Amino acid sequence: MATTSYHSRSNSLPSRQHPITSQIDENLNRLRASQSASTSSSIGQNLNGLQDLHEYVDMLLQLPLTQQALAQEQQRKWVEELFDGSIMLLDVCSTAKDALLQTKECTQELQSILRRRRGVEGLGDEVRKYLTSRKAVKKAICKALKNLKHMENKLSSSSSIKDAENGAVISILREVQAVTISMLESLLLFISGPEAGSKLSRWSLVSRLMHQKKVMYEEEGQKTHEIASAEAGLRSLVKSENMKNVENVQNKLHNSELCIQDLEEELESLFRRLIKARVTVLNILNC
């Protein structure tokens, strides 16, 4: 009798045909189609798409039938796994936010210095400060990418769920996490620069998709990568000691700052969405 009751509750879970899960599938397909994005505008669009995706996920989790089913003891393992994943994604988002903020502050400081200076004397020291800061940013990003890779491996190696209806919901949530990981990988690689993929690949920590993104960076050139372009311009300016290049470098720094500001706004909105979903999952665990 208890078994019949259990299956009755399980079968009431939203299926892939439910309006909300259908919306989630549509968003997943759009993001998968653009997951090789390597420009700031396309990455920003994907972050915006992730916001919509996680909003639908929260709507799914808010459904009483979903909460009742996932609150069952049989589902606790999968809900805890989902919760652990949400914490990791929030940590990675925090790393990306810190990296963008640190790079933006250094960029703004250099712009101010370049506006005041009439020569390149002493500029090398300022650029070295910028490059040292960028090195610290890249180190933090490498660690975040390793964590994402670990999470990705854990998702792919997880055992399948036998119950068809429960499996549909859990499968959707896992697919959402997988796509979110891919989008955050793109963002982190963009912030760090095209060389990040080659460095990480020597540690066998980068997937084939991440390698493809690196190739796209190289094919499209630094003109589509505002942060890397500004960094390269600064290196060239100090090496040549030619003040004629200052205006060009200032433009690159300005473009980098605007790019960072746009990514910051999208990332902050995504961060709030992830926190909202995490609170919902925590409430389910506490039921």
Image: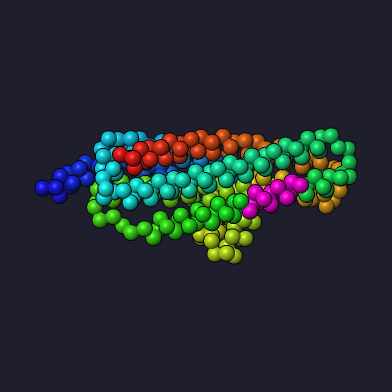
Magenta range: 129-139
Extreme left residue here?
A: 1
* Residue 117, position as x, y percentages in the image: 86, 37
Above or below, 209 against 120 in this view is below
* Residue 254, position as x, y percentages in the image: 71, 37
Q: Could you tell me which residue is drawn at 48 percent across and 35 percent down?
A: 272
Magenta-drawn stretch contains 133: yes
Front residue (pair 200, 78): 78
Residue 276, image quadrant: top left
> Which SS type dominates the magenta stretch?
helix
Q: Could you tell me which residue is drawn at 37 percent across and 41 percent down?
A: 281
Extreme front residue here?
A: 286
Q: Could you tell me which residue is drawn at 31 percent across and 48 percent down?
A: 76
**143 lies left or right of 164:** right
For the C terminus, give its image quadrant. top left
Question: Number of marks in the image?
Answer: 0
Above or below, 26 against 145 in this view is above
Residue 99, image quadrant: top right
Magenta-drawn stretch contains 215: no
* Residue 12, position as x, y percentages in the image: 21, 41
Front residue (pair 32, 125): 125
* Whether residue 98 can be seen here: yes
**166 lies left or right of 156:** left
Q: Could you tell me which residue is drawn at 65 percent across and 36 percent down?
A: 258
